[in-house]
Image (spheres, grey):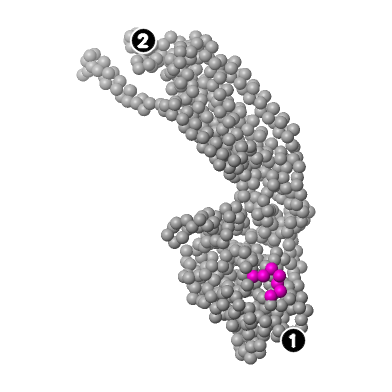
Amino acid sequence: MSTPTGAPHNIDSNRPNRVKAKKTPPSSPKKSLVGLLIVFLALIGGIAATDSWLPKLGLDLEGGREVVLEPVVTGGSSVNESQVKQAVDIIRNRVDASGTAEAEVTTLGARNIVVSIPGNPSRQVLDSLSRSSQLDFRAVVATAQGSKQGQSPYRLPEVIKSSGANQATPSASASASPSASSSGGSSSPAPSSSGSSKDVLPSAYKQAGPENASDTAWGEQKVDAAWVKAGIASSNMTYNQLLQVYACTPSYQEVAASIPANKPVVVCSKEGNEKLLLGPVEVKGADLTDASSGMATNQQGNQTGEIAVDLKLNGEGKTAFANVTRRVALLQEPRNRFAITVDGQSISAPNVREPLTSGQAQITGGFTAESGKLLADSLKFGALPMSFKELTSDQLSPELGSDQLTKGIIAGAIGLGLVVLYSLFQYRALGLVTVASLLVAAAMTYLAVTLLGSVNNFRLSMAGVTGLIVAIGITADSFIVYFERVRDEVRSGRPLRAAVDTGWARAKRTIIISDAVNFLAAAVLYVLSESTVKAFAFTLGLTTLIDLLVVMLFTHPVVALLARTKFFGNGHPASGLDPERLGARTATYAGRGRVTLADRRRAAQEGTA
């Protein structure tokens, strides 16, 4: 029923819809450049805060420290191959979690482990590698004043050499200690009378033994054979007596770390100012599901300014922890405390005021940000099957040195130069945008690598340098895709300004997909590989992300701004966007700065019909 005059009305009515479809304007080039500037300022500000303007180099370029660890075994125990392999995996995880890149962990012979770390690692990092980090929760039975001499109230050699008849003297001396200790409490008199009263106690009591892990009767038990073999105690010594002679030294701590979980143990606090007699293990480290470090918070959720290590337990650990704290909360000092021990040392022994049923615990006690993170990482990755001691520690010289690094930089410069020559030859003045984009990408990569070195201890090895060199081609490929899309639009008859917007809309999808594939490949390679290959994969993934940023925030905005100039907008022969040189066809004006051949063909076909 429509008339010929109705057709134009239909066409006119469709035009607003076509304009509305392109209503959303492209992002402003100037805003994109401002965003790029903000990224640079953030990187520079982060580096300025760390005051380290040079990237850290890996083991092969800078050298480092090589530590040989020897397993510590007690009681005639042996070390098998599976234990050593397990220890290697755990130590490697600890090194990686500390942010130390390019570290190497290998075996030496059947027992020893060699750890090579770039740079000069701190003593805390080295110590964290050799510690077993076996976490246990034990109830406090009794306490005493800490001592590093182990001679209070009597000398250790005298105790070891004394006969059973002479044990009355130590018992009498021990009776003074609980009253002098800061903890006092109702639990102290029981252990103090151990020497004289055990003969008059009912035999049924002696056979029954302690009722639970907090029972003071543990103090009357004979010490474990490990203490006797280490020469710290005699065979007829009790744990109450051991509490008095125990010294807060590393040698004593090694023995304490080897005590079985079902036996009581004597340990020192981390500060060394308190000794604790602890009952058997009630919550095991194997029940730990996660550990993290951060600022401690109070009950109101406010930060206290103290570093804490937060622990999460599994279902079994949660139940055991609730049962223990429910019992301990009803006891008097010092037995209302629950100690958290790691490697024969009490990290924390807080008072328990109410049952803890959430399955979460928090360790505090003078941690620094570094020491808290090291402890959390050690606990999270599990305990070593045995403790290790540092056998040797040597400084390593660079394997490749500055000569190989120089050659790598020369290779990168040659590759960059070839890309620049090709860009200038193929794209004329437009190739200068490629050069500028590569320089921006190089500057951003340098800042990112430097910042990662300061914040996360990332180190650039020769494999990482190789990844950066390969990234030159990936970055240049993005520019080529974009420029060719723009030139295709120019060939189709669009003016440069319209060609830039349309070409970018089409090239952007291709660039994103290409970089996504590259990043996915780098991520898979990083996850499945080890050692030096990880460094290559990491730098490849990093530069892929930087390529996206540079193309989005620099290359396209610059080309969009250049398209507004007479030199590029009018298609100067030297601009690289000359329509005649590109073989552009004659185009018709489509309104609002749009020129398309499709409209002309459609009009011609309608006229022919």
How many residues crowd mark 1 within 10 Å: few (<14), some (14–19), many (20+)? Answer: few
Q: Quadrant of residue 385?
A: bottom right
Q: CA distance from mark 2 to mark 1?
A: 122 Å
Would residue 217 appear left or right of 75 to someone viewing this image?
left
What is the x, y in percent for residue 62?
A: 71, 40
Question: In the rendered structure, which amino acid carries the disc numbered 1?
Answer: Ala
Q: Is residue 551 magenta?
A: no
Residue corresponding to mark 2: 604
Quadrant of the snapshot with the N terminus: top left
Q: Which mark is residue 165?
A: 1
Q: Residue at x 62, y 74 (%)?
A: 144
Instruction: Please provide the residue range marked out in magenta.
Output: 146-152
What is the x, y in percent for residue 553?
A: 49, 29
Question: In the rendered structure, which amino acid carries the disc numbered 2?
Answer: Ala
Q: Which mark is residue 487?
A: none
The answer to whether one can see residue 56 in this image is yes
- Give the SS element for disc 2: helix
Majority secondary structure of magenta residues: loop
Q: Quadrant of residue 286?
A: bottom right
In the rendered view, would you say 47 is above or below 329? above
In the rendered view, would you say 601 is above or below 60? above
Quadrant of the snapshot with the C terminus: top left
Q: Residue at x 74, y 86 (%)?
A: 165
In the rendered view, would you say 354 is above or below 512? below
Would residue 214 appear left or right of 563 to someone viewing this image?
right
How many residues crowd mark 2 within 10 Å: few (<14), some (14–19), many (20+)? Answer: few
